[in-house]
Image: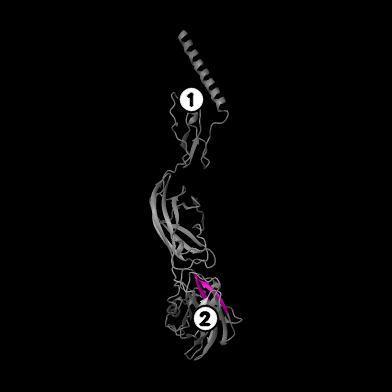
Amino acid sequence: MSVRTAAAIAVVAGVVTTLLPFSATAASAAPATDDHAVLRTEMGAPVPSGPLTRGGATESFDLTVKNPTGKVVTYNPWMLVDPTGPSRLKKDDVVFKVEAVDAPATNSSIGQQDGGWQGTFFPAGEPGGDKGGFDIPANGKMTWKVTIGLGANYPTNDGDFSLNATSYNNSVAPGGADSHTFKVDPQIKTGELKTWFKQVSSGKDGQEQRAYLDLNYQATGEGTFGTALATSLSLSHPGEQEADFRVQALFDGRWQDLKAEDSRYELPRIPKGFGAADGVHTLPLRVSLGNHTKLTKKTTITMEAEVRHAEGNSYPLKTGSVQFPLVPFAETVPTDTPSTTPSTAPSTAPSVQPAVATSTGNGNVTTTGSTTTATTATTATPATGSLATTGAGSSTGLYAGLAAALVALGSAAAWLGRRRGLSA
């Protein structure tokens, strides 16, 4: 139900601003003065009174919906929980039940939209969502008993929460929705999750142009996260040329490549129990352009991090971004290309030529191994898409001896030729 109405906005001003009703189309354009936004909700005092505890006793209150007009108005119940603290709620973190008091038989359900917790109820035997509503009679009212409590796994870093009674069909008048604040025991000082990038350096690093960045996490307040924290990275740049990013993270003591799935790179997870006592958690990153990049000049890259619970309610907790320049490295030379200069200078002219790296014309480098003459040393191995190396095998000495014999034979023939010429 796609209607975030003016009435709902007025009531839920303190609720997560991205929270939306179940579907997403019709009444986003409905004016705040819609003539059917006339109902009023009233919440009685919870019984028993006092704070809620995780997995403990529930509390109940009467919810009455009044229609002060002379015509029937449909009410689509929408109960919104707005917690304090950094963790998002799963469905079973809050106990929710609704029973009819002066209303048709009722069923209830718990839903989630855009990371928020929401309870709904509807006539028994009818589907939930935006199809199941109650027709509040002209100048009449209906009443339900609502039961609320905390699940055993209500996050330890979340505290008190408010429960707001509105409607997702824009039938509650602006300012006409009631709410309660429920205390949670033990009381804690709630905090937040902070996430930020720090660019460390950018420039040529060995054979690549790289940008080094740190992604930092810090939790404040009391309590800890009840699940591991997952982070995904996405990278973008102006234009449509392929960038061919290479993204690496430093963990387990070494730089490791991150594989992209649906254009997103998953980072190592922060284990369950992350809290203020852990201080700042830093994950070093480095980014470069791969061999298949089509970028030809210095380009500004935007990298965005999205942090979420690794399980349960996985709607993002935090997002952050950073911009940095990358320069394509025009000629990437494989790190294992042999040197074109002998490691030690021989006292006499070498009979074996050193290995020579020659370009195949398609960006690959073909390395030829040791040969006996300059003529064979310039023969490049055909390109196969990877570095091809030919080296000296166990029969090198035999071939070298034969070659030397042939050279000596050729020299003798030439000497005889000269002798004959002189004698003539």
| Residue closest to the eye, 273 or 34 | 273
Q: Is residue 111 magenta?
A: yes
Q: Label 1 amino acid?
A: Ser
Q: How far from the left and from the top, in percent, is residue 65? A: 50, 86
Where disc 1 sits, the SS reads loop
Q: Is residue 381 above or below residue 67?
A: above
Q: How far from the left and from the top, in percent, is residue 411? A: 49, 17
Mark 1 crowd level (few <14, some 14–19, many ≥20, 10 Å Cα): few
Question: Is the C-beta separation of discs 1 and 2 under 8 Å?
Answer: no
- Occupied quadrant, residue 219: bottom left
Q: How far from the left and from the top, in percent, is residue 59? A: 54, 81
Q: Is residue 391 above or below residue 202?
A: above
Mark 2 crowd level (few <14, some 14–19, many ≥20, 10 Å Cα): many
Q: Residue at x 46, y 25 (%)?
A: 350
| Residue closest to the eye, 241 or 107 | 107
Q: Is residue 346 above or below residue 273?
A: above
Question: In the rendered structure, which segment of residues is drawn in magenta?
Answer: 108-118
Describe the colour scheme in one phrase.
Answer: one colour
> Can residue 424 be seen by looking at this rendering?
no
| Residue closest to the eye, 144 or 241 | 144
According to the image, label 1 marks what residue? 351
According to the image, label 2 marks what residue? 77
Q: Residue at x 51, y 40 (%)?
A: 387
Q: Label 2 amino acid?
A: Pro
- Occupied quadrant, residue 29: bottom left
Where disc 2 sits, the SS reads strand
Q: Is residue 85 above or below residue 208?
A: below
Alpha carbon separation for disc pair 1 and 2 = 92 Å
Q: How far from the left and from the top, in percent, is residue 328? A: 41, 48
Of the residues under marks 1 and 2, which one precedes in the sequence? 2
